[in-house]
Every structure is written in C-alpha cells, then in structure tokens.
Image: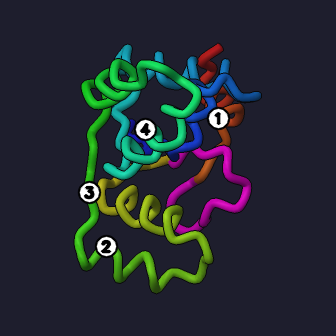
Amino acid sequence: MKIFLDTNIFLDLILKREKYQDALIILNSVESSLFDATILDITLLNIDYIAKKQVKDIKEFLNAINSSFEVVGANNQHITKALNLQNIDFEDNLQYTLAKESRCKIIVSNDKDFIKKDIEVLSSSEFIMRFDLQ
C-alpha cells in the first residue's frame, strides 16, 4: 500500500517529541518495505532547516529518508491546485495535492487540522493501530 508521510512524522522522530515511538515504528515499517511511502521534496528541506538547530549530523538522517522514500516535487499546476483548496495551510494543501497525484491511499500526519478530502488521514497512533504495527 502506498502512503504519504507529513513532515511532522519525521520531526517527531528526529527531535524526540511526544510521538517519537510512533514515528520510529512507521519509518521502520517503510524501511522494511511493508509500505511504499512518498514525501514532498520540501519535507527534506524543512527537516534540515528545523532539526539542524538541535541535531548535529542531520545529513545521515536525510540520506536515510532519501533512500527509503519516493520524493515528489511540485510544479505550477500542483501549486495552483493547492492554492485553490479551501484550507489555510498551504504546505498541507501541497502535500495533499501530491499525495493524491501519487495515488497514496493514506496520509499519516499528526496535524489535527490536516486537510481531509479524498484521501484518508490518520495520526501516527491511528496508523499503527490500524495496521497492527506494534
């Protein structure tokens, strides 16, 4: 099954936030090829920008993500679609747009306000419970 991971899942892991353990389980399931996973190219940039202030060697983590995930990028048409969605978070809209185009079945996000339209959105905990990954 193809899934899309929101940036916050990676930040939960690298910054050891509350959902750290969930993120670790999900990323391990992708690395083990239980799921095909997609991310937006700006996810790598956002991780680098946010985490390098707190983590010394973020490059190894970014390399691991790059080798395990399909990385997709936005073009003018994607940006137009994202801007036209009725949701105020442009980054979420862009992630949703690319997840839909990439034919992802589920978006995993710990953002309670992530746009919900044609793709099911699950929190990391909900995703783990749904697929019995514990």
**Which quarter of the image is occupied by the N terminus?**
top left
Identify the residue under disc 1.
Answer: 124
Mark 3 crowdedness (10 Å alpha carbons): few <14, some 14-19, many ≥20: few
Q: Mark 4 points at which residue?
A: 48
The answer for how far apart the CA atoms under marks 4 and 3 are is 17 Å
Mark 4–mark 1 distance (CA, rounded to whole Å): 21 Å
Q: Name the residue under label 3.
A: 73
Q: Of discs 4 and 1, which sits in the foreground? A: 4
Q: Quadrant of the C terminus?
A: top right
- Of mark 4 and mark 3, the one earlier in the sequence is 4
Q: Are marks 4 and 3 in contact (CB under 8 Å)?
A: no
Asked if residue 97 lies left or right of residue 16, the reply is left
> Mark 2 = which residue?
78
Nearest to N terminus: mark 4 or mark 1? 4
Under mark 2, the amino acid is: His
Q: In this view, does 39 lie above or below 80?
A: above
Tags 3 and 2 in contact by the CB under 8 Å rule? no
Q: Is mark 2 on a helix, strand or loop?
A: helix
Residue 44: image x %, image y %? Answer: 37, 41
**Magenta stretch: residue 40 in it?**
no
Place of residue 113 in the rendered image (x, y in percent of width and height, measured from the top left): 70, 61
Give the magenta part as a residue range: 107-120
User: Mark 4 is on which residue type?
Assistant: Asp
Q: Do the residues labelled 3 and 1 touch (CB within 8 Å)?
A: no
